[in-house]
Amino acid sequence: MSEPRDRQAASGTDPAAFDQEIDVRAVLSFGIGLALTMILVLSAVWLLLDHWRSRQIALDPPPPPIAEARAPRLPPEPRLQSSPARDMEELRAREDAILKTYGRVDPQAGIGRIPIDRAVDLLLEKGLSAPPPATPPKDRKVRPRRPGGKRPAAAAPRRGVS
């Protein structure tokens, strides 16, 4: 049984010996140094980009005055609806108010309006008056049209033929 221990010692696979080979202090100092170097480099790049941006803004010419004159304006009348659904709801509400309420249309002439349901009820009670008699149409000779849509030309009367 002593043989396997000797082999482990000779091959260097002893776990205690393996942990002693790693220098934890050196690994931590390298990681901290790397982090500090990255912070230093990134802050330098950020400051450099900020300097370049401010320099570029200073070199840019001011906007032309015509750009200010071309500010957005409302288009001429008639304009498109900004919210067609809301406009349709308002129209239907106004129409319903007219159709379902009493009101005066022309007070001088004594013309008013009544709800449509009431008007239908009154019409059913009284009934419709008979329409005036229709005048018969005048008798007129109509010639059939040709398939091309043109009327045939009137033929000249024949003379001397018996």
Image (cartoon, rainbow, N blue to C red):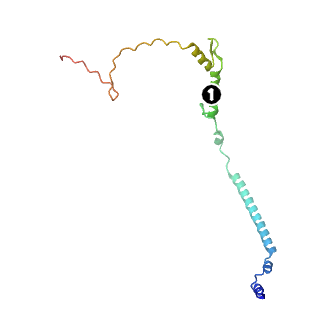
In the foreground, 150 or 19 = 19
x, y (%) of residue 154?
29, 21
In the foreground, 54 or 134 = 134
In the foreground, 141 or 82 = 141
> Which secondary structure, mark 1?
helix
In the foreground, 26 or 89 = 89
x, y (%) of residue 123?
57, 15
Image point (64%, 30%), residue name = 89
Residue that mark 1 sits on: 92
Image point (67%, 51%), residue name = 60
Number of marks in picture: 1
Can you say which quadrant of the picture contains the C terminus? top left
x, y (%) of residue 137?
40, 15
Q: Establish if 67 lies above or below 54.
A: above
Q: Callout 1: few (<14), some (14-19), or many (20+) C-alpha neighbours within 10 Å?
A: few
Q: Quadrant of residue 86?
A: top right
Can you say which quadrant of the picture contains the N terminus? bottom right
Q: Quadrant of residue 55?
A: bottom right
